[in-house]
Image (cartoon, helix red, strand yellow):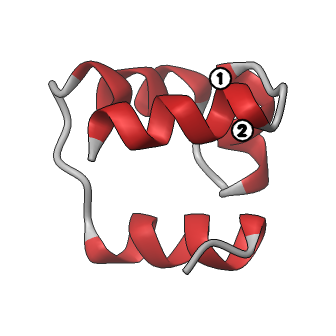
């Protein structure tokens, strides 16, 4: 899942900061998610799916 998030972000040509902004999260919080030090909640997954039309 972490790899897929990073790939999605890079495919969209977004920085961590811009990606995090779109999903209502801080850049530092999102960086922790990408590194695997912060758990991915269902709410976060839903926000990503809605913001970037991911299914």
Q: Secondary structure at mark 1?
A: helix
Q: Residue at x 65, y 23 (%)?
A: 16
Mark 1 and mark 2 in contact? Answer it, CB < 8 Å: yes
Q: Is residue 41 above or below residue 20?
A: below
Query: Toward which corner of the image does residue 7 lie, by quadrant?
Result: top right
Q: Is residue 50 above or below residue 37?
A: below
Q: Residue at x 78, y 52 (%)?
A: 22
Alpha-carbon span between mark 1 and mark 2: 5 Å
Labels in figure, total: 2
Q: Position of residue 27 (x, y in %)?
A: 59, 25
| Residue 49 in the figure: left or right of residue 21 | left
Query: Toward which corner of the image does residue 2 lie, by quadrant?
Result: top left
Q: Position of residue 32 (x, y in %)?
A: 32, 24
How crowded pointer 1 is (Cα within 10 Å; few <14, some 14-19, many 20+) is rated as some
Q: Which residue is mark 1?
A: 16
Front-most of 24 and 54? 54
Q: Is residue 11 above or below residue 45?
A: above
Q: Is residue 9 above or below residue 24?
A: above
């Amino acid at each position: 899942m972490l790899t897929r998030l990073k790939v999605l972000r890079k495919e969209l040509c977004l920085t961590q900061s811009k990606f995090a902004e779109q999903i209502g999260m801080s850049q530092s919080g999102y960086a922790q998610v990408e590194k695997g030090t912060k758990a991915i909640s269902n709410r976060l997954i839903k926000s990503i799916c809605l913001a970037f039309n991911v299914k």
